[in-house]
Amino acid sequence: MEGTVFTPSLEAMKHVKSEQGEMLTKPFLDVSKLILPVIDKFGAALALVKSDIGGNITRLENKYLSNPTEFEKLYSLVQVEISAKTSKGSSSCTNGLLWLTRAMDFLVELFRNLLAHPDWTMSQACTDSYTKTLKKWHGWLASASFTVAMKLAPDRKKFMDVIGGSGDINADMEKFCANFSPFLEENHKFLASVGMDDLKAS
């Protein structure tokens, strides 16, 4: 493959914000989709994360497609639910954006761990990022399934070779974390402003 598995998402990130600095729905979802091939390479260990991310992208995308003009800006998907008092529903777009953002926090933290701790196994890197990000929002059951799944993490060197392609994987991974995490922070800030950033899994 040309470049690394991160190359397409790094390119797509340039379009996430409008000239006015607003988060745009389709470009944000496009970048999120481009991370799915990276998660694929983790195999069974992150199958749960992948289906969760995929499901939330689909939910947000369907809402966007129902009226691309009205929902051009990412946060309009939430604002319309806040007004209608439907934002707390488990199948709401607000919930979808919250969990999509949290899953992405986990991935960014995982990539940071891989960069910062060359001596860690993949399983260690996954478990540490899970503890720092998703764990406090998960109930006992989700937490237990996650812990089991982490034991299935692939061999680190094999994984890095597979996602590296013909590019500089560490540089791209670092760039991905640096460029993508401000979007995630902005999502949290917005969700907190409407009182929706601290919902726990049911």
Image (cartoon, rainbow, N blue to C red):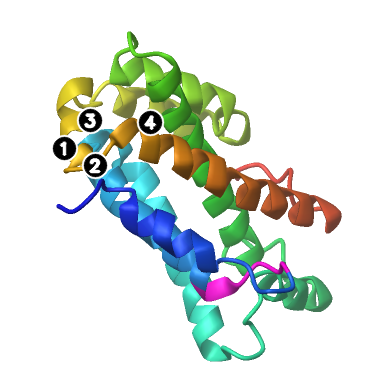
User: At x 23% / y 22%, what residue is drawn?
Assistant: 156
Q: Residues within 10 Å of mark 1 (few under 14, many from 20)?
A: some
What residue is pinned by disc 3?
Answer: 160
Q: Secondary structure at mark 2?
A: loop
Q: Earlier in the sequence, mark 1 or mark 2?
A: 1
Q: CA distance from mark 1 to mark 2?
A: 11 Å
Amino acid marked by disc 4: Ser
User: Which residue in the protein does label 4 denote?
Assistant: 145
Do tag 3 and tag 2 residues touch (Cβ < 8 Å)?
A: no
Image position of 144 (left or right of 164): right
Which of 113 and 197 lies nearest the eye of the viewer? 113
| Cα distance between the residues tagged 3 and 4 | 25 Å
Q: Along the polypeptide, which appears first: circle 3 or circle 4?
A: 4
> Residue at the spot x=67%, y=88% of the render?
70
Q: Nearer the viewer, residue 87 or 26?
A: 26
Residue identifier under label 1: 162
- Would you say residue 155 is visible in this rendering? no
Q: Nearer the viewer, mark 1 or mark 2?
A: 2
Q: Earlier in the sequence, mark 3 or mark 2?
A: 3
Which range of residues does the magenta coloring cover?
A: 21-26
